[in-house]
Amino acid sequence: NAGVTQTPKFRVLKTGQSMTLLCAQDMNHEYMYWYRQDPGMGLRLIHYSVGEGTTAKGEVPDGYNVSRLKKQNFLLGLESAAPSQTSVYFCASSHTKPRKINQPQHFGDGTRLSIL
Amino acid sequence: KQEVTQIPAALSVPEGENLVLNCSFTDSAIYNLQWFRQDPGKGLTSLLLIQSSQREQTSGRLNASLDKSSGRSTLYIAASQPGDSATYLCAVSSGAGSYQLTFGKGTKLSVIP
C-alpha cells in the first residue's frame, strides 16, 4: 500500500550541481505532477504529465526538466542547481484531470532539498 | 490569475470545540475545490473534494461547503481533537486544461488538550 513514493527524502547540493528526484506511484494513475512548496508561497506546479511519454510545463518550470518514460515513474531533474531552488518538492498523481468527479490528487511525503 | 486566500493563518482552540476554517478564491469559474491536511514533514492528504455543482461534502466530523458565486468555502470541524492539529490547505481547480491546482497558504491548526 505504498501510494506515491519519493526518493531521496533529503538532499544537500552545492550551487551548479545536478540531481534527479524520483517519484514512483503504484496506483496505475495516468496523471502525475511535481510541485514545490516554499514558505509564504504555498504549493506551485512545476511540471506535469498526462501519460507515459508526455510532459508539460506548469506555473514555475524554469530550471527544471522532467521525464515520464514509464507510467509509474516521473523524474524531476535540476541540471545546474541554484540557491533559489531550495525548497520542499512534492510529487502527486491522479487518475484523471483534477476537474473530473471525485478524483483527488495523491501526494508523496516530499523531498527536502537545500542548495548551498 | 486565480488566487486563493485562507484566513486565519493560524488558529489555536481547546479540545472539543467546533471550528471553521475559511478559504476564498478570486475567480468563481472553478471545476472543483479540495481541502487537504498536511502534517509536519509529510505530504498532503486529501480530505474532501467538492465539485463546482455541489454545495457541500461531509466526511465524519468534517463538513466542507462551497459558495461558488461568492468565491468562498468553509471547512467545519466538529468536536475537535488534538489529533486534528495540522495545516489545512484549500486548493481550486480552474482555468483551461484544469491541470493546475491553485493552493492557498494554509491554516495551521493547534488543538490544545
Image (cartoon, rainbow, N blue to C red):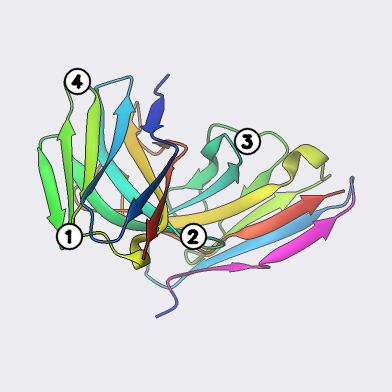
Q: Nearer the viewer, mark 3 or mark 1?
A: 1
Q: Which residue is denoted by mark 1 in the rendering?
A: B61
Point out the frontmost of discs 3 and 4: 4
Q: Which residue is mark 2?
A: B43
Using the numbered discs, state the Cα–Cα distance from disc 2 to disc 3 in whole angstroms: 21 Å
Disc 1: CA contacts within 10 A as few (<14), some (14-19) or many (>=20): few
* Up-down relation of residue A22 to residue B67 (above or below): below
Tell whether position A11 is magenta.
yes
Picture disc at residue B70: 4
Q: Residue at x 47, y 63 (%)?
A: A71
User: Residue visible at 74% across and 46% down?
Assistant: A86
Name the amino acid, label 1: Arg
| Residue at mark 4: chain | B
Q: What amino acid is labelled 3 in the image?
A: Pro
Residue that mark 3 sits on: A61
Q: Which comes sooner in the sequence, label 2 or label 4?
A: 2
Helix, strand or loop under label 1: loop
Mark 2 vs mark 3, foreground winner is 2
Q: Is residue A43 left or right of residue B96?
A: right
Q: Are marks 3 and 1 in one subunit?
A: no
Residue at 24%, 44% (x, y): give it: B75
Q: Main secondary structure of the magenta part?
A: strand
Residue B73: image x %, image y %?
Answer: 23, 34
Disc 2 and disc 3 on one polypeptide chain? no
